[in-house]
Amino acid sequence: MRVLLVSRRWYPEVVGGGQISAHKMAQALVKAGIDVHALTFVTEGGRKDEIIDGVKITRLPIRKLKLFPRFSNLEWMYREMRLQTLKFVKEWKPDVIHALNGESVPSMAGVFRKTGIPFVATVNGPLLFCFPGEGTDRHGKNCIGCKGRQRYEETMLRWGKRGRLVAFLYWLYSYPHMANLARSVKTAKLLLPISNGFKKDLLRLGYRNERIRVVHNPIEVQSRVKSAVRKELSIPPTAKVLLYAGRVTENKGVQNVMDAMKDLPETYLVVVGKGEYAQPLQDKANALGIHARVRFTGFVPNDKLSPYYSIANIVLMAGTFYESLGRMLMEACTYGVPVIGTDIGGIPDVIEDGKNGFLLKSQDITELRDKIKAILDNPSLAKKMGAYGKAKMKKEFSPDAVVKELISAYNEAQHLR
């Protein structure tokens, strides 16, 4: 079987967990004997063919508009990706096309209409169903599929800083844009949400159960390593360490962890990552008087994170961001680290409340603090949680388990009308 994996970006160009998961998935498929080719796109330079970790990758150039950057990153980009893919499938003829992210789905729907090559779509984020793109509203509630007044209010909140007229025009534009995305999603032979949480949202939006297959992102179990990070960051040997590793944005909830730390005097927080919210977080740490116990490392490549997970007592995702699964939490579990995350999206697929960590039912700081303390004050519980999480990742999220589901989906897609 020949499978074309299509993604707007591909490893090592990483902007989130999706690119890492896609590359791991491709490696597992190659190992299983599937003839895989990854197709991705660049806005600078020409075509590049390469092999990374046994995965054949072709990077094709797409043009950007000099004006209207948002349109350049949406409808125009879909057009460019479709045209380049149509040329490529004449050269490398796949049996199935797998669109690996929301940006790829409209393009591959167009390729299917032209060629008849069946395609399946991974659903790993809210962008296909949420115009503001966050998946949650200003109150932290699920707003996937929002329309009318709710979409208007969230659009004004997101783009209103650029002027109400600009935000209003975005809101008007959202209707043809989201209609195009809905048509594209319905063209896919199968939808492959990466969590049961996202499957529930697809069913709520009216997508048919018989065309939905949950396929988790793959991950491999790891072992803690001897780490010099604690010494490098001047963290005392006996101090407890809370870890966040990812994009530093307000909706990831690091500020909530800081608020909880006021009552956790011998606990340090390590924030690994970069983003526009880093400076406000540093200002908050100073205002709270906990700056001496907070460390900001900036960006660290994914393959260099092992020493950080190895010193962590808890890894946290305490915000309102709609995590379709939560790779950071998965990675923590593979190292045997207890996890705490908000009960939203796909996070409950990773965290079994009370088993390998705790789910947050609210944004209440007292709840967060109490659940942190419950783990830190009970080493026996922490050890049990770590072991359970590690076993869960091995059983449910291993590359072998994921590939089995993928191959089944590819075979099925070729026979669906």
Image (cartoon, rainbow, N blue to C red):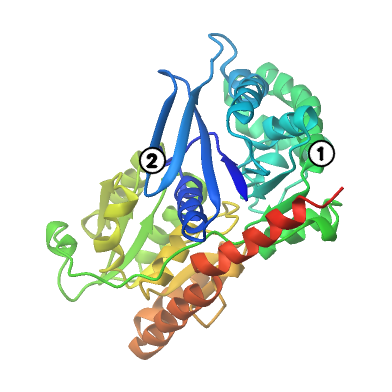
**Residue 12 in view, yes or no:** no
Q: Is residue 116 left or right of residue 274?
A: right
- The secondary structure type at the circle numbered 2 is strand
The residue type indicated by label 2 comes to: Ile
Residue 214: image quadrant is: bottom right
| Residue 264 percent coordinates (x, y) | 33, 71
Residue 87: image quadrant is: top right
The furthest residue to the top? 66
Q: Residues within 10 Å of mark 2 (few under 14, many from 20)?
A: few
Camera-nearest residue between 271 and 71: 71
The residue type indicated by label 1 comes to: Lys
Q: Is residue 24 left or right of residue 222?
A: right
| Residue 207 percent coordinates (x, y) | 84, 52
Question: In the image, which is nearer the foreground, mark 1 or mark 2?
Answer: 2
Compared with residue 309, is residue 124 higher up or lower down, i.e. above or below? above
Of callouts 1 and 2, which one flags the residue occurring earlier in the amino acid sequence? 2
- The secondary structure type at the circle numbered 1 is loop
The disc placed on residue 51 is 2
Camera-nearest residue between 308 and 414: 414
The residue identified by callout 1 is 147
Residue 45: image quadrant is: top left
Looking at the image, which residue is at 42% across and 87% down?
A: 384
